[in-house]
Image: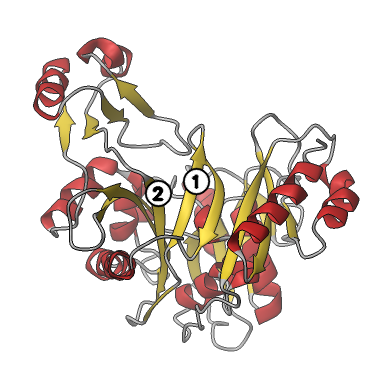
Amino acid sequence: MSDTRGTQAPVVAVVGGGQLARMMQESAIALGVHLRALVEARDGSTGQVVVDSSVGEASDAPAVVDLCWGADVLTFEHEHVPQSVLASLPPDLPVNPPASALLYAQDKLAMRERLSALGIPCPRWARLDTPADLHRFGDEVGWPVIVKTPVGGYDGHGVRVVRTASDVDDWFAHGGPLLAEEKVPFTGELAALLARRPSGEVRSWPVARTIQRHGVCAEVEAPAPGLAPGVAEEARVIGETIARELGVTGVLAVEMFLVEGPGDEGGQRILVNELAMRPHNSGHWTIDGAVTSQFEQHLRAVLDLPLGDPSPRAPWSVMVNLLGSELPDPALGLGGAFAASPDARVHLYGKSVRPGRKLGHVTVCGDDLAAARAQAEAAVTALRGE
């Protein structure tokens, strides 16, 4: 893309203007990496802090091509970049993760087919082209079932709990296919977070427990409490296998269900739910709780630099999301947050307040899980103005 590569600081182009690219900028500054962003709004979360940003949509091929001019690599803070846009990029531009891998984070049907072919444990699933397909699947695995739109869903959007074959007639009316999955009787949710560089090096953080509320991640505990060591190792191996087999580069988050039942590890088994090929909400704890954060690691990985140490800095890290606030700006609650929890590490995203919106997060690290959780929750309560 440019004959200046190798004679100046690395330039990383990133598509997306949310909080992930904003936090990526913090690590870019520390490393002397030049981050350039394509943002949805100049005053958005990333546009506020990345000087070299332009306004445009991920679906706008000319805007993405312009973003990449002179860049050493292109990466993403979300998966919603059409394959047609990626195909329009110059062939000599490194893209991490590559389009061939990103496909499996964009299309849930493609992901299920590929993981099943690899022997990765997944919920029972089926492709649905007609309501009759859904009727057969529900009768086979038992109602209710989960139905998802294969493309475009996130944070609970595009997902329904379905009790009859007619419950998604409106989705079928817009054309198929759809993805059906058994409703897994899980007792917990996990995230295996890792990074892989193009030359093949892989490093994994401890497997974390995630707690969802209304389809949105509310809390993360690392390492996952009560997880049998063998299951934690299995989760790590699954994540690293997926990264290698799919050719993922950068950070990969593998979201998993934890199911209690017959088995060798205290009756615990895991099933892969979703993939995210970028820094992920389940990894925010690494900013304060790990030797190398997911954001620094992502930059190292996409630039094919040696990866950092993912070891935790403390026995426990608890990250609690700030979802909405009664305050006009949650920063007005900083005094109360630090009074309630002096050890809290507060990260605010510069977003306007809306009910349920992810406005920031708080992390507390320490020797006692319950105490860390209580402190993080107390700080978030103050930032909500409660």
Percent of width and height locating residue 188 = 39, 47
Pick whichever, 305 or 252, lies toward us: 252
Q: Is residue 76 above or below residue 383?
A: below
User: Pointer 1: what residue?
Assistant: 211
Marks 2 and 1: CB-CB under 8 Å? yes
The residue positioned 17% from the left and 51% from the top of the image is: 262
Tell me if 269 is positioned left or right of 142 in this view. Answer: right
Quarter of the C terminus within the rendering: top right
Residue 279 visible in the shown view: yes
Label 1 sits on a secondary structure element that is strand
Residue 95 visible in the shown view: no
Percent of width and height locating residue 341 = 79, 58
What label sits on residue 189 in the rendered view? Answer: 2
Q: Amino acid at mark 2?
A: Glu
Percent of width and height locating residue 281 = 54, 53
Q: Is residue 64 above or below residue 10?
A: above
What label sits on residue 300 in the rendered view? Answer: none
Q: In 3D space, how far apart are the residues under numbered discs 2 and 1 (Cα atoms)?
A: 7 Å
Q: Within 10 Å of the Cα at label 2, are there few (<14), some (14-19), or many (20+) other Cα atoms?
A: many
Tell me if 117 is positioned left or right of 280 in this view. Answer: left
Q: Amino acid at mark 1?
A: Ile
Pick whichever, 47 or 300, lies toward us: 300
The residue positioned 54% from the left and 54% from the top of the image is: 220
Mark 2 or mark 1: name the one nearer the start of the chain: 2
Where is residue 177, by image quadrant? top left
The residue positioned 33% from the left and 65% from the top of the image is: 228
Q: Within 10 Å of the Cα at label 1, are there few (<14), some (14-19), or many (20+) other Cα atoms?
A: some
Percent of width and height locating residue 138 = 16, 23
Pick whichever, 175 or 209, lies toward us: 209
Label 2 sits on a secondary structure element that is strand
Q: Number of callouts in the render?
A: 2
